[in-house]
Image (spheres, rainbow, N blue to C red):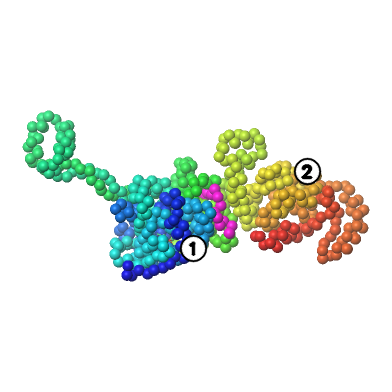
Amino acid sequence: RSNAEKFEFQAEVSRLMDIIINSLYSNKDIFLRELISNASDALDKIRFLSLTDKDILGEGDNAKLDIQIKLDKEKKILSIRDRGIGMTKEDLVKNLGTIAKSGTSAFVEKMQTSGDLNLIGQFGVGFYSVYLVADYVEVISKNNDDKQYVWESKADGAFAISEDTWNEPLGRGTEIRLHLKEEAGEYLEEFKLKELVKRYSEFINFPIYIWASKEVDVEVPADEDESSDEDDSTESSSKEESEDEDADKDEDEEKKPKTKTVKETTYEWELLNDVKAIWLRSPKEVTEEEYTKFYHSLAKDFSNEKPLSWSHFTAEGDVEFKAVLYVPPKAPHDLYESYYSSNKSNLKLYVRRVFISDEFDELLPKYLSFLKGLVDSDSLPLNVSREMLQQHSSLKTIKKKLIRKALDMIRRLADEDPDESTDKEKKEEMSSDIDEKKGQYTKFWNEFGKSIKLGIIEDATNRNRLAKLLRFESSKSEGKLTSLDQYISRMKAGQKDIFYITGTSKEQLENSPFLERLKKKNFEVIYFTDPVDEYLMQYLMDYEDKKFQNVSKEGLKLGKDTKDKELKESFKDLTKWWKNSLSKDNVDDVKISDRLDNTPCVVVTSKFGWSANMERIMQSQTL
Ligand code: ADP
Ligand code: MG
C-alpha cells in the first residue's frame, strides 16, 4: 500500500513472535480468549470514560458495548471486533510492537525452558498469541481522537501502519482480522468458536456475539415444471386436510400460486454468554466449578489448577460492597521482584457494576497483593475521576474489611487442613471428610509464607492475626512445619519465653553450640532460616504475652539455678582477666552462663545488637 509506514518490532517482541509462529504447541485455542480479553478491556476503558463524558460513546450502534465474532470460510478469515476505546496511530505503534512490556523477556525465557504458552496473558503479551493460528494479521482500529488505521504484520520482524481508506468505517473500536494458517481451519467452524467462548470467556462482562448461520425453511414460489421433490412436499402437507376438501383442490391450485419449502442459510447474531456477574449472585447459588472458572478468567491463569481458597461476601453498613477474593494456587513469577517499587494490587474495582480499575493499590496492602479478586461497591461515586476516587473516604473502610476477610480466609485454609491439626482424633475425622484440603496450608505457606512475614513487618494492626498464620520448623517439629500456638502448647512448665535462633539452614542451626543446653533441658527452639526472618523478629516482639528470645543473644534465661551466684563468684578472676585481655573494642563483657553444655565458650550478641546471622545478611545484602 502506498501510504503504509513501516516499523520494526522491538527485539524481544520479535523473538517472542518467532517462538509463537513456529510453535508446535498443541493448545492453540488460547488466542481467542486473549483477543476477547483485550476487547473486554477496551470496552471497560470506553465505558469508564463515558462516566464523566456522556457524549463519548456516540449514538446508535456505536453506543453498543459488545464483541462480535465473524467467519469468512472462503477467504479463511476470522475476525473479532469490539466497540471499545480503539487505538490511535500512536497507540498501534506503541502497544503492538515497539514497546516491550516488562514481562516480555521473562516470558521469552520461560517459553524456552517450559514452553507453556498458556500463561501468555499473565505476562502482558497475550495479543501475539494470534500468530499461533494466523500467519498474517490485520488490526483495524478507530479511536475518537484519530482517524481509522490498519496495522498489519506477517510476523517477519516488521509491521506496517496505513491510514484506512478502503475498509468500512468502524465508528469506534477495533477489528482484528486473522488470516488463518492452513492447519488452523478448525477455527472457521462455528461450533468450535462457540465452544471456546463458552469454555474460556464465560465471565466476560460484555455480550459476545457470533455471526451464526442458521438453516431455515422458507416458502418460495414453485415453478410449474419443477421436479417431483416439491410435489411430495405439497402432498404431504395436504394429507391432514379432510377428504371433503379434496374436491376443491384443483380449483385452489389454479387460484393460488404454487409454493414450496426449501432450506436456506441465513445469518444472525447469536449471543454466546450470559453477562450476569457472578459476584452479584448469592454465594449459595454459585458452584465450586463456577468459582474456579471465574478465578481462571479473572487471574488469566489457565493452568487449570484450582485456587487454594476463596471468599465471597457482602459487606453492609456505612459502606456497602460485594467482593470475591481468591488465594491463587501459585505465586506469580515476579511477586517479590518489584515488591517495594510497584503498586500492583490484583483486585479489580467496580463501582455499581462498572469496571473502574485494576490498579487501585488503595484496596489492599502490599503484602496481600498476591490475592486475586474483585470489589464492587455501591458506596463510591461513579462520575468522578480516578484521582478523586482514590481519595474517597470509603476506601479506607473497604480496605480494612478486605484485610480482615482475607486473613480469615487464610486462617480457614489452615483450620480445614487435617495436616495442621495436632489432635489425632480430629485429624482422622477431618482426613476422611475432606481429603482435598489435606496439605493445602503447607502449599500456601510455601508459595506465600514470605508475604505473611512481610505483613507482620508492615501491618502493626493485624500483627497478632498474621503471627497466628506463621509457620516454621523447630528443634521439635520433626521436619514438619509448626505454628506459634503449637509451640506454646508444648512449652515446659515455668518456661516464660519463646526461644528461636536464626541462621542459613536447619542443618547449620541444629549443630549450633547455642542449642546445646536448651536441647539438654528439653526446651524447643524455633529455627528461622529465611533472610527476611531477621527483619521479622525486629517487629515481632511477643505473642500471647510471651516474649521472643533469640538464643544467640544476651538475656537467655532457662529457669532458676541456685548455683548461679556461687559460680559467678568462683570464676570472677577468670572473667575479669579474660575481659581485660580481649580489650573493649572486641567484646562488651565476659560472663558465666548456663547456655552451653559441651562447648566451653561462645560469642553472644548483646540484646539490641545484630545477631551474627544479621551481620552475615547485611554483608551479603541478600535482601
Ligand atoms: P495486555 O492485554 O496484557 O495489555 P496484550 O498483548 O494482550 O497485553 O495487548 C497489548 C496492548 O494492545 C493492550 O494493553 C492494549 O493497549 C492494546 N490492545 C490490544 N487489543 C486491543 C483492542 N481490542 N482495543 C484496544 N486496544 C487493544
Ligand atoms: Mg491482553
Residue designated by label 2: 522
Res. 623 visible in picture: yes
Q: Residue at x 66, y 35 (%)?
A: 424
Q: Is mark 2 within 8 Å of ligand 1?
A: no
Secondary element at image label 2: loop
Which mark is nearer the camera, 2 or 1?
1
Mark 1 or mark 2, which is nearer the start of the sequence?
A: 1
> Which mark is on residue 12?
1
Query: Which amino acid, mark 1?
Result: Glu
Under mark 2, the amino acid is Asn
Residue 391 shown left or right of residue 127 in the figure: right
Q: Which residues are magenta?
A: 322-337
Residue 294 x %, y %: 46, 48
> In the image, what residue occupies the spot 44% across and 47% down?
278
Task: Measuring from the top left, give residue 171's x and y in whole percent.
Answer: 32, 62
Q: Are marks 2 and 1 in contact (CB under 8 Å)?
A: no
Few, some or many residues within 10 Å of mark 1 (<14, 14–19, 20+): some
Residue 332 highlighted magenta (yes or no): yes
Q: Is residue 550 left or right of residue 572?
A: left
Q: Is residue 219 magenta?
A: no
Q: Nearer the viewer, residue 445 or 159?
A: 159
Residue at (39, 61) in percent of width and height? 154
Percent coordinates x, y for residue 207 in the rendering: 37, 51
Q: Is mark 1 within 8 Å of ligand 1?
A: no
Q: Residue at x 52, y 52 (%)?
A: 114
Pick whichever, 72 or 444, lies toward us: 72
- Assign the C terminus to one quadrant of the image: bottom right
Density class for disc 2 (Cα within 10 Å; few <14, some 14-19, many ≥20) is few
Q: Position of residue 319 (x, y in %)?
A: 50, 53
